[in-house]
Image (spheres, helix red, strand yellow):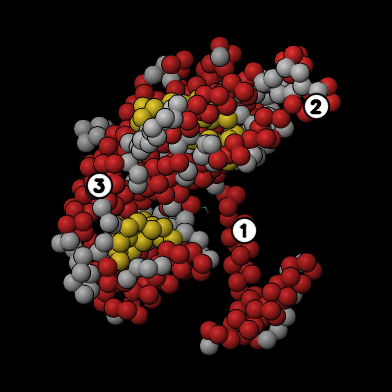
Amino acid sequence: MDLLLNLATEAKVNEKIGKMFAGERINETENRAVLHVALRAPKDEVITCDGQNVVPAVHEVLDKIKAFSEKVRSGKWVGATGKPLTDVVCIGIGGSFLGPLFVHTALQTEPKCAEAAGKRQLRFLSNVDPIDVALALDGLEPETTLVVIVSKTFTTAETMLNARTVRSWIIAALGKDAVAKHMVAVSTNLKLVSEFGIDTANVFAFWDWVGGRFSVCSAVGVVPLALQYGFENVEEFLQGAWDVDKHFRDASLESNIPVLLGLIGVWNATFLGYPSRAILPYCQSLSKLAPHIQQVSMESNGKGVTIEGLPTPYPTGQIDFGEPGTNGQHSFYQLIHQGRVIPCDFIGIIKSQHSVYLKGEMVSNHDELMCNFFAQADALAYGKTKEQLLSEGVPEALVSHKTFTGNRPSLSILLPTLTPYTVGQLLAMYEHQVAVQGFVWGINSFDQWGVELGKVLALKVRKEVSLSRNKGTKVTAFNYSTNFLLNQYLKEKEEVMKTFD
Ligand SMILES: O=P(O)(O)OC[C@H]1O[C@](O)(CO)[C@@H](O)[C@@H]1O
């Protein structure tokens, strides 16, 4: 740790944390500040960007969300047919989906939140796959449904096509005027939202100094979560995140949790050369943590050049994946124990959201789960030696198959309970850990140019597909392989297209 803390000092991690909280444009390639911490700062905190304190504007939007969510939840805001809107469909992708889904999944079984939600439903529509549209709208009635379109840019193809699709679902049932009562938006692009036909009074803004993957504490998350769980529970979530922000800002490096976690990540990925990390929550409610952190971490640190644009002289970034325990144990843990080394993050909860203890059982169901939480870290660290196996009478021929190397790194995080507050803490801890790794690697963790080429090529394919259909010509615009597959696709898709006429 001393060597890593020296590295953090040499990499000016403290200064870089300071610049982030000071609203400096540390996202140099997009010339933007990185101030998602301001989204959860209390009213009396001062956080400036270009000399302007941004906290009052943050609270203005929070107040607007509070009023709106209370109106909808109390039934004062009604739909086109006068009925309360009990079901919410949130349309968004990437950072406009994964964070809210993570928090929603973590809170839906938390007793206080479950009570606040009552019979309300919160659904997410992210994929442009029509199957996801069917799943999101399944069993819902337009007259009791509120649609929240969430997009920082309001240009993301999938989100905008899904928004048009669901708008036509609303209009088909309730007429054009119903849009004003059944559709609201969350975006930084108020012009495009208004062009889409949503009244600016029904738009919840956020700012370009909020990265998509760091936006769950903005209206991106606060609107759907306040509609489902009430504003008070969301305030608790923001408080949990802010308390970790303060710790991250003020604590010295050696006692700064996100800094230490970040340095451990650099140690594993760069010095020990372990490219992956498994995020393993021993809590079913955290099943959407890994998918969210996949974007936070891999879209941030999956870079090949330094902030100066030079090739990175060492491997950066981690390949993150994960599943809740103990399910993962019966799936990919074989590889984690005896195959490649994959550093693991085990996350456990002391007091579960639900308790079951059958008469006559040695331990409660949650204890049973947590026994594995404690055991797995030791199995990875200490393994099982040839000598131990032989002393247990394991046949010689099986010894090497049953040997566990041990010396496999893992991190154990134990939370007291899983509440809005601790979910906020967990989120901020991972967000800042990722930032620290980027600060040490000298890369820009806050841009994502790598997502653009695929989007541009998809637009070209779309154009060629529509051209081929309109002209009845074969596609020849791409390489032999893609032309061949695409023409095969178009030929066999003809039957389906006829059903749309
Ligand atoms: O919120 P938006 O602008 O629709 O973007 C959605 C997501 O798409 C990305 O830009 C990646 O394509 C992410 O960074 C972002 O979270």
Residue 272 in sight in this render: yes
Q: Is mark 2 within 8 Å of ligand 1?
A: no
Residues 473 and 56: in front is 473
The residue where tag 2 is placed is 398
Q: Is residue 265 above or below residue 475?
A: above
Q: Nearer the viewer, mark 1 or mark 3?
A: 3
- Which image quadrant for residue 11? top right
Q: Is residue 442 left or right of residue 18?
A: right
Q: Position of residue 220 (x, y in %)?
A: 36, 51
Q: Is residue 5 left or right of residue 44?
A: right
The residue where tag 3 is placed is 115
Along the polypeptide, which appears first: circle 3 or circle 2?
3
Residue 212 in sight in this render: no
Q: Position of residue 298 (x, y in %)?
A: 57, 41
Q: Is residue 189 above or below residue 309?
A: below
Residue at the outermost front position: 360
Along the polypeptide, which appears first: circle 2 or circle 1?
2
Along the polypeptide, which appears first: circle 1 or circle 3?
3
Q: Is residue 242 above or below residue 229?
A: above
Q: Amino acid at mark 3?
A: Glu
The answer to whether the residue labelled 1 contacts the one labelled 3, judged by CB atoms less than 8 Å apart, is no
Q: Is residue 466 left or right of residue 484?
A: left
The residue where tag 1 is placed is 454
- Which image quadrant for residue 479? bottom right
Q: Circle 1 — which element?
A: helix
